[in-house]
Image (spheres, grey):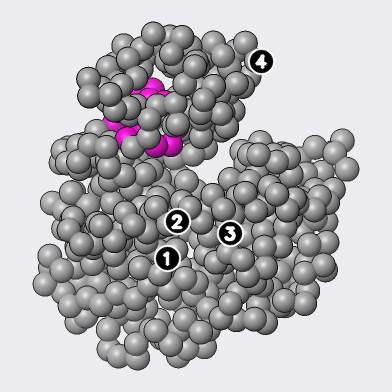
Amino acid sequence: MSLENDVRRAADLICDADSVTIVSHIDADGISTEAILAQALTRESMPVESVFVRQLEPMAMRHVPKDGSLKLFADLGAGQQNLLEEHGLSADEVLILDHHVGQPCGTAYPQVNSLDHGITRMSAAGIAYLVAKAIDPTGIDLAKLAVVGNVGDMMARENCGLVGPAREIVQDGVEYGNIVVQDHDLNCYGTSTRPVHVCLGYCDDPYIDGISNNANAALRFLERLGVELKNPRGGWLVWEELPFDDRRTIISALAQQLIAHGRDTDRLLAETYIFPDESERTPLRNASEYATLLNACGRWAKPKVGSSICRGERGEAYRDAEHMLAHHRTVIRDLLQYILDAGVTERSHLQYIHTGDRFPDTIVGIGAGMALSKLNWKKPMMVLAAMVDEPEVMKVSMRTNEWALGHGVDLCEALVEASAAVGGAGGGHRIAAGAFIPHDTEEEFVDGVNRILKRQFASADPNDS
Ligand SMILES: [Mn+2]
């Protein structure tokens, strides 16, 4: 079956239901997915309830109501079909919209999974949007949320912009008027909210010698270019506010800086997505910052606040979210500092640290990603964390980069295999994956992951051993 057929069938199943319960994930992709589906169904006068879960595991299943509604599992479910089966859910009361690796299962649950169609660069929000559009082709305002979810799930990272079906969705938003595509824009986070030198100081993909990790040096670099960095009132301008010519001046100087240090310039520019209907200088103004705001809501146990923002609420919900974003950043900064201060343990093909119960297990993956660029970036980074509410279980998060993917690394495969060997469970993506393992199997597990990574590196390059 083609993706179009799967999407059509999903839309028909939804339209035939009396009511729908959406079960979605708490991250930016899961929240935007839920908001797309809930709005699309509400517009059809379909009764909808939403449930957000951190992870679809046995404990979380009690939040799934036993009623006559269609259970719409979104941004999760594909890898937990046996759990749905154990929970007594039959094929005619379930629909899965997911982009994670599926699990073989005796019950043939209807589903739309981008991976089944060879699409690796479209997240659940993209699938949800296609389904919503199949229900009502006029609802193209929702494309904006699909872009937030896709960018939040790093679908734009590898190619410096969205590609394939996820890119086609962008065009709907452009047509509607709530997305502006910036071609050849600076590939840097914070272009709508941070002073330009701060923005550049945080940029580590590409790594720019003398600028990355050093906002003061970035400021001196910009001052030498003679571009106006402040507004007439003396406040810092953000990247988005700079005149076109100044942006070009800075970009060509950055390109020269990269070349002078023998680095590639191909990751300096990216296609970015601006939302002209949102206020300037807010995190809602572009896709990547919007996604961070939603992630902050989810990680701090308020995914419904994020969902309200996706539906257009800008009062109390937005103030709550801004507060969570500030808190989110502070804790992540502390986590990163802790990792750098405490130091990681290096194995031949990975590096890891155990953060105990110092940080919530919902954010350690973000810390792993940030630490990677400041440590040995060639070795995939693992963070192990205790789970306060489940002392028998340990949460594992791993992150790597494009370089390692190019050398054969697949973290999802590594964690699925190594966690199964110690009685745990893992999943995710090649570049970012997670697992839950019994707390007393740490050493055996780390050994196992290291061995699998060694095998992966070796299969891509027989000289690496
Ligand atoms: Mn996702």
Mark 1 residue crowding within 10 angstroms, few (<14) / some (14–19) / many (20+):
some
The crowd level at tag 4 (other Cα within 10 Å; few <14, some 14-19, many 20+) is: few
Name the element at disc 2.
helix
Q: Are marks 1 and 4 in contact (CB under 8 Å)?
A: no
Q: Amino acid at mark 1?
A: Trp
* Other residues around mark 3 within 10 Å, as few (<14) / some (14–19) / many (≥20): many
Q: Residue at x 60, y 13 (%)?
A: 259
Marks 3 and 1 sit apart, C-alpha to C-alpha, by 13 Å
Which numbered tag is attached to residue 328?
Answer: 2
Q: Quadrant of the C terminus?
A: top right
Between label 4 and label 2, give the one nearer the viewer: 2
Q: Which residue is mark 1?
A: 300
Task: Report, in whole angstroms, how far the alpha carbon at label 2 lies from the one at label 1.
Answer: 8 Å
**Viewer-closest of 127 and 291:** 291
First in sequence: mark 2 vs mark 3: 2
Residue closest to the eye, 279 or 452: 279
- The residue tagged 3 is 364
Looking at the rendered structure, the kind of residue marked 3 is Val
Q: Which mark is residue 262?
A: 4
Give the alpha-carbon distance from disc 1 to disc 4, as whole Å.
41 Å
